Image: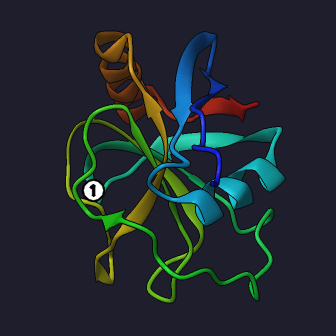
Amino acid sequence: MPQPLLPATVTVTIGADVFLARLRQDLAPRWCQRLKELMPYRGDVIHARWSGEAIWSPLSSNWQSQAVFPPESPTGRPRSGDVLLFAGSQSEPELLIAYGPTRFASKSGALEGNVVLTIDDRHARLAELGREILWRGALRLRIE
């Protein structure tokens, strides 16, 4: 009998703020494995102007264009604290971090990504950071 996948804890650091997140192997095991291959991830987050209350980090420099996986429980309406991993033909590969009402999109239209992490605490602070990024600009992102 296969062993159940246990939730792993990942650290998501945005600027100076540290958040603990669950690796969502229960929803997207192949996409979570791809995220693990990118870790420790270092990049910037900027505001996701097409998606509502979300920030995003482009993965183009870290993503092999031939790396294609079928969607696993994709969503275009993540909840606050959900981190989506997207790599599709409509937009560049990216991580999207929802901090409030979000409808994942690009200038090409609606998108769906796979939930690979869920930040379960400090949503109020996550929302403050999202608004700071909107008005003041990019912050550093680390996922490890």
Q: Is residue 102 left or right of residue 96?
A: left
Please give the name of the residue rendered at 53% of the width and 82% of the height, measured from the top-left corner.
70
Please give the name of the residue rendered at 76% of the width and 69% of the height, measured from the top-left corner.
63
Tell me the amino acid under the disc marked 1.
Ser
Specify the quadrant that holds the N terminus: bottom right
- Residue 121's image quarter? top left
**Vertical position of residue 136 compared to residue 92: above or below:** above
**Mark 1 neighbour class, 10 Å CA radius: few under 14, some 14 to 19, many 20 or more:** many
Q: Mark 1 points at which residue?
A: 51
Q: Position of residue 23 (x, y in %)?
A: 57, 38
Which is more toward the observer, 30 or 55?
30
Please give the name of the residue rendered at 33% of the width and 84% of the height, measured from the top-left corner.
108
Q: Where is residue 8 in the image (x, y as percent from the top left)?
A: 64, 30
Which is more toward the observer, 4 or 62?
4
Please give the name of the residue rendered at 36% of the width and 31% of the height, measured from the top-left corner.
81
Specify the quadrant that holds the C terminus: top right
Q: Where is residue 59 in the image (x, y as percent from the top left)?
A: 68, 61
